[in-house]
Amino acid sequence: MPGFNITIETLDIRDYKAYNPLEEKNTYSGELKVLASVSVNAKQKNIAVVMKVEVYVKRSERSHMTPVGYIETVAVFSVINEWKKVRVGKKQSDIAVDKDLEDFLIDISYNSTRGLLFEKGKNDLIGKVILPVIDPADIKREKG
């Protein structure tokens, strides 16, 4: 993945919910729902990436998935030095970010979310879930 000259302006948890419906065990099987939303502020030349991660686990092979928590984070990046990678039209729908730059920002945002979840969830079951490393190209996008 190429490198870019960007700066993180802010990194914050927007929403966090932890449900502890299960007694703790050493291992679980489960799944994640991960969604990234990218929005551009052309006036300030920054890009915001919102990550939404829902975590589900199974009690046993025969049980259904049970939600254990949700985290939503926002990272705002100054991309003034990479602005040539952003195409801005007259309408919000005409704004496009270079795919490599978008993947790079989503990768940073997802990995930051992993760390924030670990720290915020220290006393919750969701905090014991280790989010896997995911290729940013495989993360579903939501229009921001």
Image: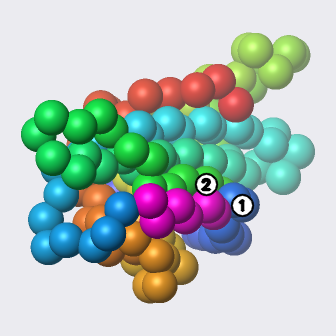
Res 56 seen here: yes
Say which quadrant the C terminus sits in: top right
Q: Amino acid at mark 1?
A: Arg
Rendered residue at 25%/46% (across/down):
58
Q: Residue 124's mark? A: none
Give the total of numbered labels: 2
Q: Residue 72's mark? A: 2
Res 101 seen here: no
Q: Is residue 111 magenta?
A: no
Q: Is residue 20 magenta?
A: yes
Say few, some or many: other residues with alpha carbon within 10 Å of mark 1 (under 14 / 14 to 19 / 20 or more): few
In the image, 25 versus 138, the foreground residue is 25
Magenta residues span 16-21
Rendered residue at 46%/76% (across/down):
124
Q: Are marks 1 and 2 in contact (CB under 8 Å)?
A: yes
Residue under label 1: 14
Residue 135 in percent (x, y) is at 25, 43
Residue 108's place in the image compared with 92, above or below, is below
Image side of residue 9 versus residue 3, left or right: right
Residue 15 in percent (x, y) is at 69, 59
Q: Amino acid at mark 2?
A: Glu
In the image, 136 versus 16, the foreground residue is 16
Residue 46's place in the image compared with 24, above or below, is above
